[in-house]
Image (cartoon, coloured by chain):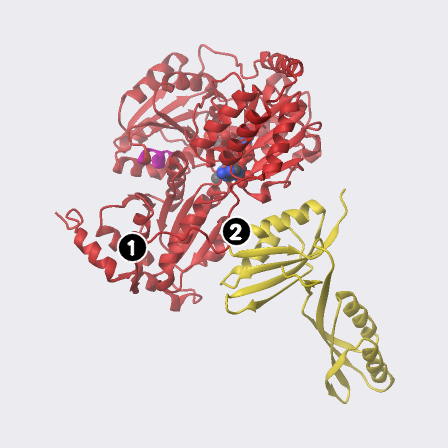
Chain colours: A red, B yellow
Amino acid sequence: MRDRLLFDWKRWETMAKRKLSGSDIVIQSLIDAGVDTIFGYPGGAVLPIYDALFKQNRLKHVLVRQEGGAVHMAEGYARSTGKLGVVLVTSGPGATNAVTGLTDALMDSIPVLCLTGQVPTHLIGNDAFQEADTTGITRPCTKHNYLVRDVKDLGRVMQEAMYVARSGRPGPVVIDLPKDVLINETTFETGKKLPVKHKTYRPQIKGDNSKIREAVELIAKAKRPLFYCGGGVVNSGPRGSKLLTEFVRMTGYPITLTLMGLGAFPATDKKFLGMVGMHGTYESNLAMHDCDVMINIGARFDDRVTGLISEFSPDSKKIHVDIDPSSINKNVAVDVPIIGDCASVLAEMIKVWKEIKPRKDTKAINSWWNQIEKWRKRDCLAYKQSKDIIKPQYALERLQALTKDRDTYITTEVGQHQMWAAQYIKFNQPNRWMTSGGLGTMGYGFPAAIGVQMAHPKATVVDISGEASFQMNIQEMSTAMQYRLPVKVFILNNEYMGMVRQWQELLYGSRYSESYTASLPDFVKLAESYGAVGLRATKPSEVDDVIKEMLNNDQFTIVDVAIDKGENCFPMIPSGAPHNEMLLGPEDEAAKPTSEDGMVLV
Amino acid sequence: MEPIERHTIAVLVDNEAGVLARVIGLFSGRGYNIESLTVAEVDPENAISRITVVTSGTPMIIAQIKAQLDRLVPVHRICDLTDGGASVERELALVKVRGTGNKRVEALRISDIFRARAIDSTNNSFVFEISGSPEKIDAFIKLMRTLGLVEISRTGAVAIARGAKGI
Ligand SMILES: Cc1cc2nc3c(=O)[nH]c(=O)nc-3n(C[C@H](O)[C@H](O)[C@H](O)COP(=O)(O)OP(=O)(O)OC[C@H]3O[C@@H](n4cnc5c(N)ncnc54)[C@H](O)[C@@H]3O)c2cc1C
Ligand SMILES: Cc1ncc(C[n+]2csc(CCOP(=O)(O)OP(=O)(O)O)c2C)c(N)n1
Ligand SMILES: [Mg+2]
């Protein structure tokens, strides 16, 4: 038995009064902040931290296979728990490998702390071995970053960084740690709590009362109202979703959610119109276009949602609740801006609503609902079932049916499968849906699923994947095996970068330039080579069986589902088109050529 | 299209490593204009620096610039001196002019009109120090061009609100 198993608490206690090394301060600060898991990969510059890790047993370290995977794992861990995700990587290539994940976390507002090793302070700037200007490289892809030059600053910086990552609009924070700072010692008080107020960073939580009142009065008078809510509600915690659900039901108004907001309001509630935006439902997008009062809570008017800005919801008064003032009036000018936390503002809105006891325009609201029901009848997510070929929509409907009564978390990669997952899987709770929305990072879903499974060991965690995306972080199979994580990778295998193929079909005359995924591995054998379970379905009749088999085993499992190679994802609003010009199916394809302006958009 | 406006914005920041890079990176990364930018420590005790940035854009962009600046962690306060009532704006320039005879006399005469000071002189050159609004400096430089202008060094604008109140 090594000494890490016989942990000596006395030693920590005496250390608390003694001088601690930088590495010990890092570890102790994480423990003090309640961190229990970190995702990392060692290297020369962080060996002191790895040594400190070895000597304790409160922090669990998950050894990844590539640093990019570590950040996505931390993101999955964070998004599924509401806690901070923590990453530890070495200098130079360790830090540069983390950049994609950091950018992903920035775009999707995920709280991540990334500790990077650095060459010793006296070598910084000398092109030393494995030196990279990490703070320079990560400045535009973090919420904030630090280079600690003196061990005396380390305790404060650790606390400040965790506070910044978690508060306000959450995001990734990097602390760059030169090796000498990790070795040097200083006195450090363990268990010391963060001062309540940061010197400069104090996000506004409570919304302006008069604005909230103005908003509620507008909501009460609406004739064609629509709630448009997003990731900010999820960011504001389970209470945010609870209050949103309460308020929407109180008003009886329809609601749509962004990709990042799925689960913030129960998908099985009749008031939910489905996702909005490029691949959103017909009823959501037409309601966005025609509404007279739009109630945006925690969504950021992303271009995937607005389509052509000049024709975006032309006749509506817009209310926008957001904790980040820079989100307001960025893409779309709004009428009633409210800066504050979703949960806090919603609580206040509910209070005012009860207080003014509004008399809604029932007649108008009823005819609005009638109109919406007409749009709904188009049944825009219907698809042609086939006897011989597995339709991706069918595979996901079955996955939904067979997982809905379990404690399930879903992650995705990026592509058609991601959009189908958003359309066909129903989320009734927040924090159950982990996807890369803002950056659209292929390779996100599998490591994210590992992070989710670390946080929820008993839950069913499924990465809905594409055969191309899965290969972007395929090396993490080894991680899943090492920690015996029963993650499920559900590959909708169309042998194409399907989303790319779809755009080439619609916009580039079906010239499928480099979008075929040739030389695929045999995913079943691949799984087996790692000691995992591999399953395959090639016919619709096999789908239920493989899903059940996947759910009934407690091992890491890869399911290769051979789907229709030519299937496209509809509905679709082509880039640069307004909401009321959406393509509902293959028959719409030729009818509307995309404008030249639209062609330059992604 | 909304009209393009020119705004002078004062930003109080913690004087810590990388803070200027953060501000400049924000402007370049998001494609905002910088007409000029100056920075110096104004409160050594609390290590606070003041950045004065002159920028231009539509009112919506200017509001975005301010919101984006305010969101940087080491930023204490933003003040839009163009929106916030009357303010004074000054810039300092050092202007080197070479010439003899009539041109030399004329340069000295004009510098007098502009209240510029000769702070270095040789037989055939002057270095003038001039301060004032950026427009006044532009005008001075334009006149010096015909009189043997050699080199210009400008600080960029600094500005402060009129009246007794601080930001
Ligand atoms: C292939 C692909 C297709 C896509 N298609 C679609 C699509 O059809 N429809 C769609 O919706 N998206 C789509 N997306 C995702 C899209 O790119 C954006 O990521 C997404 O629309 C943004 O969601 P959001 O507006 O909820 O904002 P988020 O990115 O979740 O941002 C949250 C907002 O809330 C604010 N906020 C954070 N915390 C709080 C708090 N506590 N209180 C208040 N406010 C807070 C933030 O400041 C921010 O403004 C697609 C992505 C990909 C990769
Ligand atoms: C890292 C990265 N590179 C490129 C892209 C562009 N891209 C978006 S979707 C896609 C294809 C995804 O293929 P696959 O994983 O098989 O999913 P499918 O669309 O077939 O369901 C590509 C290449 C991306 N989003 N991320
Ligand atoms: Mg594919």
Q: x%, y% of residue A233?
A: 49, 33
Residue A416 against residue A109 in the figure, above or below: above
Task: Find the distance from the CA under tag 2 to the CA under tag 1.
Answer: 32 Å
Quadrant of the image occupied by residue A466: top left
- The answer to whether B60 is drawn above or below residue A132 in the figure is above
Left or right, residue A463 beside residue A271: left
Image quadrant in which you'd find residue A531 = top left
- Amino acid type indicated by mark 1: Thr
Q: Is residue A441 visible?
A: yes
Label the magenta part by its dominant secondary structure: helix
Look at the numbered discs 2 and 1 and tell me whether their residues touch, using CB distance below 8 Å: no
Which residue is denoted by mark 1 in the rendering?
Answer: A190
Magenta-drawn stretch contains A451 = yes
Residue A368 location in percent, x, y? Answer: 64, 16
**Residue named by callout 2:** A140
Question: Of the residues tagged 2 and 1, which is closer to the observer?
Answer: 1
Residue A199: % across, % down = 48, 56
In the displayed image of the protein, which residue is found farthest to the front? A355
Residues shaded magenta: A449-454
Residue in the image at 24% along x and 62% along y: A18
